[in-house]
Amino acid sequence: MIWYNKPSIWNADKDLIHMRVEADTDFWRITHYDFVRDNGHFYYQEQAGDFVASVKITGRYADLYDQAGLMLRLDERNWIKTGIEYVDERQHVSAVVTREFSDWSVCPQSNDQPSIFLRLTRQNDSVRIDYSFDDFTYQMLRLAYFTPEVPVQIGMMAAAPDGRGFDVTFEQFSVLPIF
């Protein structure tokens, strides 16, 4: 595993990664805000072909736009991030798809959940994002285009664009090839 923008405080133990997300970090390109940020934390591996990535995330979200989830990245202009994002004082299941310009979709949650389970499936020219709060019943959040047949970076991401930072734990991260 490789760090892109490694946080000052983090540790790993078997299938558990804990980090203190630093303030003023984010991944975003241009749309609506007219700025580019590429300084969020991203702990990834390189992966070719089709695959399913999954993880369980438990975060202590407190400030506007605190976020943690999975990221699939080709470069600074082509990436997808998905997970929980804290907006309007509650959790939203969120996805940002970036192909030069970022777009953002959210699904507000009526109750803040202790953890979220994410599944990101890359197959041919598409990426399917599914989420669950019990690891049994999954719902599709998004189906997006992504450049096919190129190796990508896949892993865990977190950012705190407007807040003081927060603690997050990732468990059982895995990437399994699809044959």
Image (cartoon, rainbow, N blue to C red):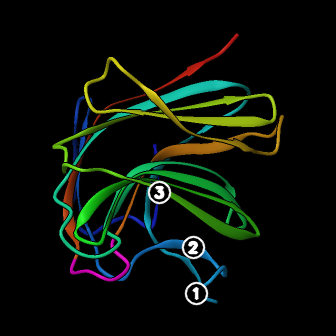
Amino acid carrying mark 1 in the image: Tyr
Q: Helix or strand or loop: what does disc 3 sit on?
A: strand
Cβ atoms under marks 2 and 1 closer than 8 Å: yes
Q: Closest to the observer: 19 or 139?
A: 139
Q: Residue at x 33, y 73 (%)?
A: 160
- Magenta region, residue range: 160-164
Q: Helix or strand or loop: what does disc 2 sit on?
A: strand
Is residue 116 depicted above or below 119 in this figure?
A: below
Q: Nearer the viewer, mark 2 or mark 3?
A: 3
User: Which residue is disc 1 drawn over?
Assistant: 33
Magenta stretch: residue 31 in it? no
Q: Helix or strand or loop: what does disc 1 sit on?
A: loop
Q: Looking at the picture, how far across and down is residue 162, in whole percent?
A: 33, 83
Residue at the bottom extreme, as displayed: 34
Mark 1, Cα crowd under 10 Å, few <14 / some 14-19 / many 20+, is few
Q: Looking at the picture, how far across and down is residue 99, in whole percent?
A: 76, 62
Q: Closest to the observer: 48 or 85?
A: 85
Numbered circle sitting on residue 113: none
- Left or right: where 167 falls relative to 122: left
Amino acid carrying mark 3 in the image: Val
User: Which residue is disc 3 drawn over?
Assistant: 106
Quarter residue 113 falls in: top left
Quarter residue 172 falls in: top left
Task: First in sequence, mark 2 or 3: give its number.
Answer: 2
